[in-house]
Image (spheres, rainbow, N blue to C red):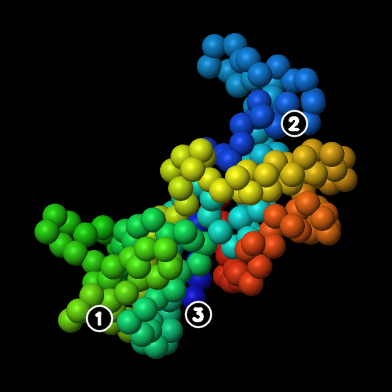
């Protein structure tokens, strides 16, 4: 079995509460007092986060910087070839490759002078074994763990269609907030604007998704 777990969520979002406030015409205050969040951030911030999460789930992509862990049982690890394909890309870095017992945390990152047995094939979301290297041997109930980072660091570097998609979904969530908020969100896939923006990601699959709280 292969299982993907998000271990660190994005710290920023594709759009700001002020931008969504303008788009919706809600008229919330965008200025907070001291370190307190503004009215727009308080009311629209959760909507933006949910919209981004939906867009990532439906597109199979990570938009802004976050971390993932791929765990494999011995049977699957033993069947690995030289190339390991990642989900939830674009992948920006592979941070850990190692073996852990069930329930344990990630293996330690390589120390100074130590290297991973694989390298990232940029633009293809793949890990490729280096010459003379092999994947760690997994036995019993232990797990092979590969940790990696995905997404882009700056929202300004996002594809404009990603920004539009999150904005459209946030608007739908806001307008349907009295309908149980996220319940029934799958119906948004019938929205022509949403469907058109998601079309560029058609064919990507997301399996074993577990989002960390």
Q: Is residue 10 left or right of residue 123?
A: right
Q: Nearer the viewer, mark 1 or mark 2?
A: 2
Going from N to C along the chain, the mark reached first, 3 or 2, is 3
Residue sitting at x 57%, y 39%: 13
Q: Position of residue 206 (x, y in %)?
A: 60, 68
Q: Is residue 73 left or right of residue 163?
A: left
Residue under pointer 3: 1
Quick one: SS at disc 3?
Answer: loop
Q: Which mark is residue 23?
A: 2
The span from disc 1 to disc 2 (Cα, nearest Å) is 52 Å
Residue 112, compared with residue 47, is above or below; it is below
Residue 41 occupies quadrant: top right
Q: Position of residue 40 (x, y in %)?
A: 69, 24
Q: Nearer the viewer, mark 3 or mark 2?
A: 2
Q: Position of residue 116 (x, y in %)?
A: 23, 66
Q: In this view of the protein, can residue 1 be seen by the observer?
A: yes
Q: In this view of the protein, can residue 7 be seen by the observer?
A: no
Residue sitting at x 60%, y 69%: 204
Q: Which mark is residue 134?
A: 1
Residue 163, compared with residue 198, is above or below; it is above
Residue sitting at x 78%, y 31%: 24
Residue 136, compared with residue 58, is above or below; it is below
Q: Nearer the viewer, residue 161 or 20?
A: 161
């Amino acid at each position: 079995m292969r299982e993907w777990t998000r271990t660190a969520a994005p710290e920023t979002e594709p759009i700001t509460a002020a931008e969504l406030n303008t788009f919706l015409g809600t008229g919330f205050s965008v200025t907070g007092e001291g370190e307190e969040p503004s009215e727009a951030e308080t009311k629209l911030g959760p909507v933006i986060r949910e919209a981004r999460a939906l867009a990532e789930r439906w597109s199979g992509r990570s938009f802004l910087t976050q971390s993932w862990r791929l765990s494999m049982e011995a049977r699957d690890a033993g069947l690995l070839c030289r190339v390991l394909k990642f989900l939830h890309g674009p992948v920006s870095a592979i941070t850990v490759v190692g073996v852990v017992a069930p329930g344990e945390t990630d293996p330690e990152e390589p120390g100074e002078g130590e290297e991973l047995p694989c390298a990232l094939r940029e633009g293809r979301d793949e890990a490729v074994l280096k010459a003379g290297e092999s994947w760690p041997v997994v036995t019993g109930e232990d797990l092979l763990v590969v940790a990696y980072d995905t997404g882009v660091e700056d929202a300004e570097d996002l594809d404009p269609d990603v920004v539009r998609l999150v904005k459209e979904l946030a608007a739908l969530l806001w307008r349907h907030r009295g309908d149980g908020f996220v319940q029934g969100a799958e119906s948004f896939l019938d929205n022509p604007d949403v469907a058109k923006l998601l079309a560029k990601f058609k064919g990507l699959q997301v399996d074993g998704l577990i989002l960390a709280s």
